[in-house]
Amino acid sequence: MDKIKLIEQEYTKKNVPKFNVGDTLRVIVKIPEGQNKIRLHPFEGVVIAKKGSGLRETFTLRKVSYGEGVERVFPLYSPSIESIEVIRSGKVKRAKLYYLRTKVGKRATKIESEETKTPA
């Protein structure tokens, strides 16, 4: 086996749920506030992209907060992530959902499958 993969196996032991692009996640992030204080802050949004493999895998979450779109890129195996929870699964036909950046309101957060749409 590759030496790099052997070293990476130690750090990828973190229990991470399986999720895909289009799913809605809640990520609990550790934020240092003082010398010995850590605050847990939730960030909930739609997964619009996944990149990389192994220890270098990242995912991008997007949410709309007070009318302003906020995107955040998280390394999957980051020590600053306390937990990842899948809120809702979405069915999409794209690997990257960058088109959601131009959407506003419910269209920006609601991911629906093609079967539920009525044919025109």
Image (spheres, rainbow, N blue to C red):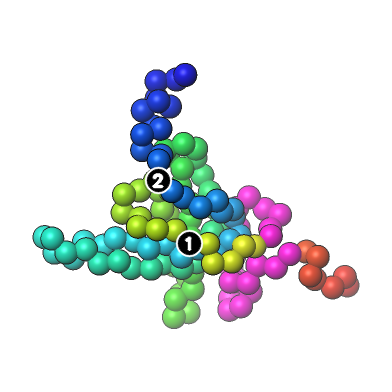
SS type, badge 1: strand
Question: Which of the two residues, 87 or 99, is positioned nearer the viewer here?
Answer: 87
Looking at the image, residue 81 sits to the left or right of residue 20; the answer is left
Residue 61 vertical placement versus 104 (above, below): above
**Magenta stretch, residue numbers:** 91-113
Residue 104 visible in the picture = yes
Q: CA distance from mark 2 to mark 1?
A: 14 Å
Residue 72 visible in the picture = no
Q: Earlier in the sequence, mark 2 or mark 1?
A: 2
**Residue 98 within the magenta-colored segment of the rendering:** yes
Q: Which mark is residue 101?
A: none
Residue 40 vertical placement versus 4 (above, below): below
Q: Which mark is residue 85?
A: 1
Residue drawn 71% across and 54% down? 93
Which corner quadrant of the image does residue 29 belong to? bottom left
Where is residue 6? Give x, y as percent: 40, 25
The residue that disc 2 covers is 14
Residue 64 vertical placement versus 84 (above, below): below
Where is residue 81? Give x, y as percent: 35, 55
What secondary structure predominates along the stretch shown in magenta?
loop
